[in-house]
Image: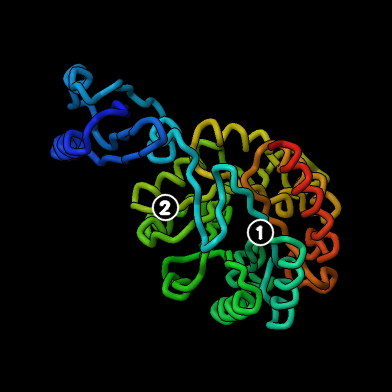
Amino acid sequence: MIVVIRSDASKDKQDRLIDWLKSMGLGIHVSVGDYQTVLGLIGDTSKVDIDLIESLDIVESVKRVSETFKCVNRKFHPEDTVVEIGSVKVGGGHFCMIAGPCSVETEEQIVAVARAVKAAGADMLRGGAFKPRTSPYDFQGLKGEGLELLKIARAETGLPIVTEIMSMVDLPLFEDVDVLQVGARNMQNFDLLKELGRTGKPILLKRGLANTLKELLMSAEYIMASGNEQVILCERGIRTYSDYLRNTLDLAAVPMLHELSHLPVVVDPSHATGIARMVPPMAQAAAACGADGIMIEVHNDPIHALCDGAQSLKPEEYADVVKKVRAIREALV
């Protein structure tokens, strides 16, 4: 249920209404916009007398929300959420380029890539320290050592770092990480999502390879319901009948997610296609359909990469993509 407050309502009356609603055992999500304030009521609203609330002089309207996701719902929060990571902003018209290798391999490698992507125009550095792999025999990442190497690259370039967390047990290691990524395989690891909701850190939540948009939004709801509103959604491709690409990039998800939710949406064309030459056109398409950011895998020596070299761009290729994506963004404004 949402309660829209009149623009001329006094703060004292708003606070009294919120306290009264909380006394019913409801959680209240407050969204303050330029022209109105919206109260999102979370919990068992069957006991709430809509007619009584509508009769209050500070209330403009009351509506029931049929969707099961509440906190992430645009009806609860009409204004776009802008997630801030240092000086970098994502959402609400702010566009972000994220780039880096699939896996952190050595200090020389991650620092070289970080410098290259920053020079090309990247806003944040991605890199995997903990790697979920289909085969137990594949490279699993440098783990804690990899996190330390990412911090060195951040110190060298000033780029905020984005890296995947796989388990609540490892959370203390991520205390100094700027953005925690939840990978596709962990999208419905609800215990992990709830724990991340208590951190207050920006979370980049990837869509599972066989999950619906509603399931993605419900996973984001777990994070937000636990108190963390700093969530970025990521479309990274889903498994369909394609026999030539790693996954199918669902670009229609971007405008639909923007319609349903106030959270920013970024696109990962690298994991979606699995083929380096497919990444540039899909990155441009993602920019054209309104994505709030694009995350691309970049490696200085893709042929010898320990993970996902086939889908990684070389630094010079990434620089060309950034120029074209920025041009598309400027044309849309």
- Residue in view at x 68 percent, y 51 percent: 294
Q: Which sits in the foreground, 271 or 81?
A: 81
Residue 190: mark: 2
Q: Is residue 189 visible?
A: yes
Q: In the rendered image, which quarter contains the C terminus?
A: top right
Q: Position of residue 266 (x, y in %)?
A: 62, 48
Residue marked by disc 1: 98
Relative to 139, is 54 above or below?
A: above
Closer to us: 29 or 34 = 34
Q: Earlier in the sequence, mark 2 or mark 1?
A: 1
In the rendered view, would you say 325 is above or below 80? below
**Label 1's element?**
strand
Q: Amino acid at mark 2?
A: Phe
Q: CA distance from mark 2 to mark 1?
A: 26 Å
The local secondary structure at tag 2 comes to helix
Who's the residue at 54% across and 42% down the image? 92
Asked if the residue at tag 1 contacts the one at tag 2, i.e. Cβ–Cβ closer than 8 Å, the answer is no
Residue 70 image point, x, y percent:
38, 36
Which residue is at the front of the view, 81 or 168? Answer: 81
Q: Nearer the viewer, residue 326 or 207?
A: 326
Task: Look at the image and tell me in which quarter the N terminus lies.
Answer: top left
Taking 171 as reference, is 33 above or below it? Answer: above
